[in-house]
Amino acid sequence: MRYLHIQNARLIDPAQQLDQVADVYVAEGRIKAIGHKPKAGEIEKSIDAQGLWLVPGFIDLGAHLGEPGFTQKGTIASETRAACAAGFTHVCALPDTKPVADSPAVIQLIQEKAAKAGFAKVLPLGALTQGLAGEQLASMFSLREAGCVALSNARAPFKDSYVLRRVMEYAATYDIPVFLTADDAALSAAGCMHEGTVSTRMGLTGIPSTAETIALAQMLLLIEQTGVRAHISQLSCARSIDMIRDARARGLAITADTTLANLVYTDAGVTGYNSQFNVRPPLRSDADRKALLAAVNAGELAVSSNHRPHEVAAKKAPFADAEPGMSMFDAFLPLALQLVDNGELNLNAFINAVSTLPAAITGVEQGLKEGNWFNATLIDPAPERTFRRAELISKGRNTPVSGQTLKGEVNAVFVDGREVF
């Protein structure tokens, strides 16, 4: 047996209560030994990881990959490579492609392109409704059989609560997980940022927190009624966290995530009408940001990228007319480590939020444990990098970190034992 030998790495895996410097031996795609040399076999390749962190690979619970249909913004190859640069070994691809991912044929196309690219694995999220129109149910069972880890309507609204109930009932019947985004379209449709003092001062139409909490209340009641296996995506405000806690106290086994942008930025970033901060969900108040951080530190929320790449022209319009979204992959790790360095985010809580919790939600085997598939990320926390748009791996140029210098980078990424980055 021939081994990949990673020497002297700091192994960090909250799920295994692991934080120690040790050697790791990998063969046939799996972790064969941790902290001791196997009795038989030879070393095929050694990596000196002195000063580096070896952590379970990150799993993104929601990213827009551009393809099929929006290749001017990104391709599966470009964006999964950028995902690797962020430390992700798996990426849940949102279904708002063109054509919409509402048929097994589109799911197969996505999987084939991801396999050909050979970077991060893509976990397709199939559409809950045909064309994401929110009216007719998609062929949900067929999508699940085609390889979708869950079904989602992205941020597209449902026609009414009756359709939402039917979606949940059908999914519950076949135990299909659903990813739901809480957004009352009637309250948020005209808005372009968080409704608050900043939006008032700038004369921009705001999106109130109640656009999220009213929709969330409806979803939680229907989840309780139908028993569907549900994950709430992209929470953005403090009140939503309280509602999730109350629902869990009543026995609902629901999971939830927030986006990294909502942990890093607030609506104050919109000052100057910087269209890079036109995102959905909107960036809310600093009180909301701190409440989200507290929930992540408490292990209550996963963290997703909500990566949405755009070409330069998409953000050239006036703020309210610019296409919403932020390209997150290139700077994902440095932005998160900035929160860690600032003392706002616990390192173990971050790894838990981007690896352990998403693994449980998606059913992916992840973790630094003997016998497991070796899906892992090697991180160097020390180097500094100045971000320049022309040097980004993602095709998306809509990042607010251009010109900033941040610390930390991914040294290597392994997917099923294969070094892909």
Image (cartoon, grey):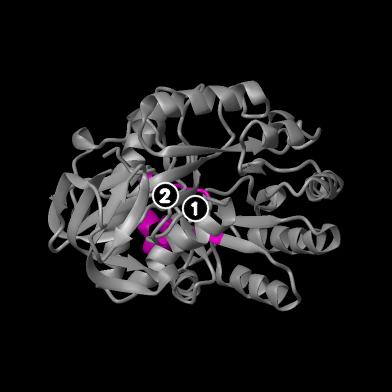
Residue 312: image quadrant is top left
How crowded is the residue under tag 1: few (<14 C-alpha within 10 Å), some, or many (20+)? few
- The quadrant of the picture occupied by the C terminus is top left
Magenta segment includes 262: yes
Query: Which mark identifies residue 2?
Result: none
Query: Residue flagged by tag 1: what amino acid is it?
Result: Glu
Horizontal side of 96 relative to 35 (left or right) equals right
Residue at 34% from the left image edge and 30% from the top image edge: 78
Query: Which mark identifies residue 373?
Result: 2
Identify which residue, 111 or 197, lies in the foreground. Answer: 111
C-alpha gap between disc 1 and disc 2: 7 Å
Can you identify the residue that label 1 sits on? 365
Identify which residue, 155 or 140, lies in the foreground. Answer: 140
Q: Is residue 74 visible?
A: no
Query: Residue flagged by tag 2: what amino acid is it?
Result: Trp
Q: Secondary structure at mark 1?
A: loop
Residue at 84% from the left image edge and 57% from the top image edge: 226
Marks 1 and 2, the one that precedes in the sequence: 1
Relative to 369, is 101 above or below?
Answer: above
In x, y percent, where is residue 419? Answer: 28, 40
- In magenta, the rendered stretch is 257-280
Q: Are marks 1 and 2 in contact (CB under 8 Å)?
A: yes
